[in-house]
Image (tube, helix red, strand yellow):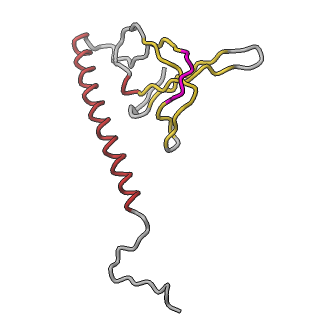
Amino acid sequence: MFETNRLDSGLIVELWNKGMLWDKLIGYHWLPLMKIPHSNEEGEGRWLSLDAELVMKDGEVVGSHTPTGFSVLLDSRFELPYDLQEGEAKELQQKLEVLNSIMDQEIVTLKEQHRRQTFSHSGMSEDSDYTSDVNYP
């Protein structure tokens, strides 16, 4: 159980085999928080394949790869406030899904803008009157 305000991140699921002398990592699974449903009831869960490696980008985990052949059954959910009725909960879930898709698009747009900004700051002078004296003896 945990609380977060950053739904653009994810949850790393690690499965370990506890040994007599050493523990052995069986695998990882990267679960984006935007893909986790909102419900107060237990679900059937879903089988997630485990991978051997985590994918890092700018110091943050963004995924996992290299399947290990192992899977884990996981039932994950964000719990809703206790005073919501069933119909309200379904309506909230639909609104959250729309909001999550909008946030996904916003994140992609912001990352693209950031990439363009860092590319455009190449250190070259934009002053048209500038002349170089490098060839001056």
Front position in the image: 66 or 31: 66
Q: Return the x and y of residue 55 as percentages of the image width and height.
A: 51, 35
Q: Return the x and y of residue 124 as percentages of the image width and height.
A: 41, 71
Q: Return the x and y of residue 13 as percentages of the image width and height.
A: 52, 22
Magenta: main secondary structure: strand
Front position in the image: 41 or 23: 23
Is residue 76 shown in magenta?
no
Q: Return the x and y of residue 82 as percentages of the image width and height.
A: 33, 13
The residue at 26%/15% (across/down) is: 89
Question: In this rendering, is residue 24 above or below 121?
Answer: above
Question: In this rendering, is residue 68 above or below 107?
Answer: above
Is residue 69 shown in magenta?
yes
Question: In this rendering, is residue 76 above or below 97?
Answer: above
Relative to 72, 19 lies left or right: right
Instruction: Check the image and name the residue furthest to the bottom.
Output: 137
Question: In this rendering, is residue 18 above or below 108?
Answer: above
Instruction: Check the image and name the residue furthest to the right.
Output: 21
Relative to 9, 129 lies left or right: left
Quadrant of the image occupied by residue 103: top left
Relative to 95, 57 lies left or right: right
The residue at 38%/82% (across/down) is: 130
The span picked out in magenta is 64-70
The residue at 48%/27% (across/down) is: 30
Total numbered labels: 0
The residue at 58%/26% (across/down) is: 52
